[in-house]
């Protein structure tokens, strides 16, 4: 299986709806930047990340996968954090996780995110959201050396 990292406007109409279908979100074109890990030969998407709410210092990160761990590799993780911390120059990444999504809590913690706050009744079903954060200096994925194409140039 050939997996490649993709980004740019030509992938937005595929990655955006795919990610939102898995995270319970609603896709709005041009809301942010997307990267994905795909098998173009089989036209399969394995993972996608949406970055939105960029304000110069921070950005929100939303991650979805195909339900397997086969997509989770160091190169993709490096690029997932390279874009917000290096290209955008963010000092922090914020993630919001529904309280009941235990798998996402474990995943975020494994990546190095730290729970910061609980937003009471903030999810659409009335349940709570946990706010996770990662600061630039705490990101262990940036120490990996991979050639990262610019997401800004891909747009």
Image (spheres, rainbow, N blue to C red):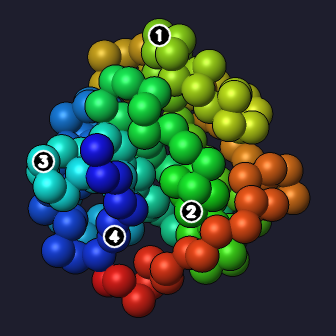
- On the image, the x and y values in percent for residue 17 come to 16, 48
Give the alpha-carbon distance from disc 1 to disc 2, as whole Å: 28 Å
Q: Which residue is mark 3?
A: 42
Q: Residue at x 34, y 52 (%)?
A: 3
Residue at the image position 32 percent from the left and 83 percent from the top: 155
> Which one is earlier in the sequence, the residue at label 3 or at label 2?
3
Compare marks 4 and 1 and give the one earlier in the sequence: 4
**Which residue is denoted by mark 1 in the rendering?**
100
In primary-sequence order, the first of circles 1 and 2 is 2
Q: Is residue 58 above or below residue 123?
A: below
Q: Is residue 104 above or below residue 53?
A: above
Q: In the rendered view, tell whether residue 29 sits above or below residue 44.
A: below
Position of 94 with respect to 92 (left or right) is left
Residue visible at 45% across and 27% down in the picture: 69
Q: Which residue is mark 4?
A: 7
Q: Is residue 79 left or right of residue 126?
A: right
How far separated are the C-alphas under marks 3 and 1? 33 Å
Q: Which mark is residue 79?
A: 2
Q: Residues within 10 Å of mark 3 (few under 14, many from 20)?
A: few
Q: Is residue 96 left or right of residue 43?
A: right
- Mark 4 vs mark 1, foreground winner is 4
Mark whose residue sits in front, 3 or 2: 3
Which sits earlier in the primary sequence, circle 4 or circle 3? 4
Label 3, label 2: how far apart the Cα atoms are:
23 Å
| CB within 8 Å, label 2 to label 4 | no
Q: Nearer the viewer, mark 1 or mark 2?
A: 2
């Amino acid at each position: 299986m050939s997996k490649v990292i993709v980004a740019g406007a030509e992938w937005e109409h595929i990655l955006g709806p795919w990610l939102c279908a898995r995270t319970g979100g609603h896709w709005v074109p041009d809301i942010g930047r997307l990267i994905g890990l795909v098998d173009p030969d089989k036209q399969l998407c394995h993972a996608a990340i949406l970055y939105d709410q960029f304000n110069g210092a921070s950005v929100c990160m939303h991650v979805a996968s195909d339900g397997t761990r086969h997509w989770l590799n160091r190169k993709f993780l490096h690029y997932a954090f390279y874009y917000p911390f290096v290209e955008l120059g963010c000092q922090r990444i914020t993630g919001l996780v529904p309280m009941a999504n235990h798998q996402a809590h474990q995943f975020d913690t494994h990546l190095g995110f730290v729970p910061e706050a609980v937003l009471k009744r903030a999810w659409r079903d009335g349940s709570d959201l946990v706010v996770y954060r990662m600061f630039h200096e705490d990101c262990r994925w940036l120490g990996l050396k991979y050639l990262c194409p610019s997401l800004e140039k891909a747009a």
